[in-house]
Image (cartoon, rainbow, N blue to C red):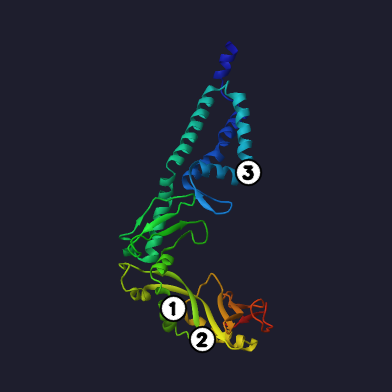
Amino acid sequence: MVNDSKKETLPMNTPEKIETFFFFASFLPLIYAVYKGFTGMFFGLQNFAWFFGITAIIYTLICEFVLLFLPIFCLAFQIQYAKKYFGTYPKVKIAARILIGVIIAAALFSSFFATQCWKMRFMPQIKNYLEDKYGENALENTSLDEPFGAAMIVKAHTPILPENATFEIHVTNAMDPIYDTLVNEFYKAEPDFYPELKIFIKEKENIPMDIDFNIVSIKFDDYKFGDDFTVLFERTEYEIKEIRVDYEKVTDDLVLELTNQVWEEIYPNIPVAERTAFDIKVSEKGVDAVTVFIHHPRNKKSEVDFLVWTSKWDGKSDLDGKKIELPL
């Protein structure tokens, strides 16, 4: 009995100190997973989404530690250490229990306040995103619902849309970490906006062909549903992504001539999307014949690909799969 009592009060030797260090270090994967419970884990098998709380902790342990291999290894080491030293060093046992208690409490806290954690992380980003895209004044009367679903989608109410209409704000982990559906909902509410804006853009950019474009942003500012939407045309930032031309008869020479014309006279003078190729869609009497893909210039050159729609068009072309370079 005396020897046991003395052993409990003896200091650890160097090997025991090293083992104790690794024992407490073995909780780091779990601590990191709990941290992700607060900051969020972006994960999904079919539809990717942000998760917080216990779900985020589990996904982190599975996905970031090779299907639980490291956490299981750490748990086995912790059990072995506890059996070996807890009876000898009760202070270590108490410290371990305190650490485990703190980890469990933090994990539960992250679950109880998952929505609040999401808001703390993303609401400032959402606010800045909306202000940059639609104007600071456009948010004065905009309200956001509580985020819902695993993806934490936020429904927003704004006087830009009809009274009972809403748009959605999605937070992703992709190239565009935040995107929304306000412009699409605005199209539905004002079906004449897009075609009239197209006419405005063609006249402004002096493009005689039909076009397709993406809207980057609209500075709605103090605009409200029912106002004259033509005031928004000058406030709209857009990217032209496609030109469409229809001929009675499509030939390779005609396609190449059109490509050079667009490249020299139109492309340099219009805003185009830099992330995707610029398309020229050539059709014959309304049937898609050839699509020309002009890739955004890199390294002082621009490459062009051709696609011939053999499944739709019964004409002939030697351009399918061909690549050429356009001079800058």
Query: Which element type, helix, strand or loop, lies under badge 1?
Result: helix
Could you say where residue 119 lies in the image, as x and y percent from the top left? 41, 50
Q: Which residue is mark 2?
A: 265
- Say few, some or many: other residues with alpha carbon within 10 Å of mark 1 (under 14 / 14 to 19 / 20 or more): some
Residue contact between numbered discs 3 and 2, judged by CB atoms under 8 Å: no
* Residue located beneath label 3 in the image: 67
Mark 1–mark 2 CB contact (< 8 Å): no
Expressed as whole percent of the image width and height from the top left, the position of residue 10 reads 56, 20
Instruction: Tell me the tag on residue 198.
Output: 1
Residue 311 left/right relative to 105 = right
Q: Amino acid at mark 3?
A: Leu
Q: Quadrant of the C terminus?
A: bottom right
Q: Earlier in the sequence, mark 3 or mark 2?
A: 3
Question: Would you place residue 10 above or below residue 1 in this image?
Answer: below
Which comes sooner in the sequence, label 1 or label 3? 3
Report x, y in % for residue 1.
58, 10
